[in-house]
Amino acid sequence: MPCVEAFDAQPQQYRDTVLTPGVPRVAIEAGVRDTWWRHVGSRGAVIGMETFGASAPAKALFEHFGFTTDNVVRTVDGLLKS
């Protein structure tokens, strides 16, 4: 979703065609994750940052915040099994 604000401004019918109700969702945000909960719903998951100002090589930060293939697969698999 390139622009949350533009998406939110669309009619509900359109938003439901993009984010089908009842389908588990995962949002991955290399930034603050709070905004995404309204789009993934209570059955979804958000992989993102909860803090600001961490400093380390990118690979270390990605691992620390869960931006890894293994974590994304594990998160999606967990949603599909629940």
Image (cartoon, rainbow, N blue to C red):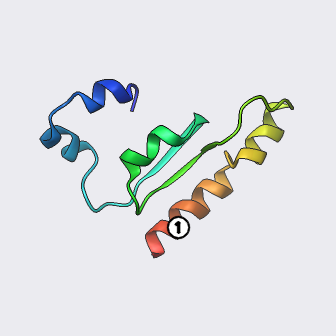
Secondary structure at badge 1 equals helix
Residue closest to the eye, 12 or 69: 12
The residue positioned 44% from the left and 58% from the top of the image is 44
The residue positioned 38% from the left and 25% from the top of the image is 3
Find disc 1 in the rendering and name its residue: 77
Answer with left or right where residue 26 lies relative to residue 74.
left
The residue positioned 72% from the left and 32% from the top of the image is 52
In this rendering, the answer to whether 1 lies above or below 44 is above
- Residue lying at the far right in this picture: please name it: 56
Q: Quadrant of the N terminus?
A: top left
Where's residue 70, x and y in %?
Answer: 67, 57
Answer with left or right where residue 25 lies relative to residue 77.
left
Callout 1 crowding tier (Cα within 10 Å): few <14, some 14–19, many ≥20 = few
Where's residue 79, x and y in %?
Answer: 47, 67
Q: Amino acid at mark 1?
A: Asp
The residue positioned 44% from the left and 48% from the top of the image is 37
